[in-house]
Image: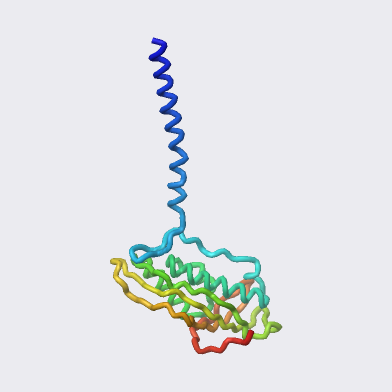
Amino acid sequence: MNISRTAATAALTLLALTACAGTPEATPATSADTKPSPASSSAPAVNIQAPATNDLVGEATPEGARAFLYYYFELKSYVLQTGDSAALLQHTDGAAAEQAEAERLQALYDDGGWVLGGQPKVENVYLITPEEEVSEGADVTAVVPVNPDAYTEFAEDGSISEQRPFSPAGTIYTATIRYSDGAWKIASLEETPDAELPEA
C-alpha cells in the first residue's frame, strides 16, 4: 500500500514538474508575436516600431537641421512599412506633396494594401543655407542624396498596383525646413535628381 502511495505521489510530482517545465516555452511564443517582421509579396510588415528621435533633432542649429532630415526620412520609411502617417504629418508644414503621399499610403493600408521595399536610405545631408544663417524662423535649404529600395505596392487582393525597380544611382531630394515653436518642420520636399551636390 505504501508502495502504491509512493508511486502515486511520484507520478503527481513528475506531472507537476512537467507542467512547470512547459511554462517557459510559452514565453518565447508571446515575444515572437511582437517581433518585427518585414513585408513580403504575400503580407505587409508587422510590429514595426516608429523611429526614435534624439536631442539634436530639437535644436535650431546646423547639426539639428541635419539630424532632423535624417529622422524625417526614417519617418518616411516607417510610413511606407506601416501606413501610419500621424508622426510624419506632425513634421510637415506646407509640404503639400508630402502630406498627400502620406495620406495616400495611409488609405492604401486602411484598404488592406501594403508596400514592399521603397525605403529611402539617406547617404548624406548637405546644407545649402550657410551654417551661420541657420536659426529659428529661417528657411533652411538642404540637398539629400538617397538610395531607395525597389518598390512594390500591393492591393488588398495581393495584386501589384505599382512597381519601381531599384536604381543604383539613387536620387536626390531638395528640402526646405523651418524651425519654429521648438521643432523643425518640412516646408517643402521635392525629388530633384539633377541637383548638384556640394563638393566634400
Q: Is residue 16 left or right of residue 43?
A: right
Q: Residue at x 64, y 80 (%)?
A: 137
Q: Return the x and y of residue 18 as percentages of the image width and height.
A: 43, 32
Total number of numbered labels?
Answer: 0
**Viewer-proximal residue, 152 or 106?**
152
Q: Return the x and y of residue 144 as percentages of the image width and height.
A: 55, 80
**Viewer-proximal residue, 170 or 188?**
170
169, above or below 51, in the image: below
**Viewer-proximal residue, 164 or 52?**
164
The residue furthest top is 1
Image quadrant occupied by the C terminus: bottom right
Q: Return the x and y of residue 31 as percentages of the image width and height.
A: 47, 49
Residue 124, by quadrant, is bottom right
Image quadrant occupied by the N terminus: top left
Q: Residue at x 42, y 70 (%)?
A: 117
Q: Return the x and y of residue 121 as percentages of the image width and height.
A: 51, 74
Say how the picture is coloured: rainbow
101, above or below 198, in the image: above
Q: Is residue 196 left or right of residue 112?
A: right
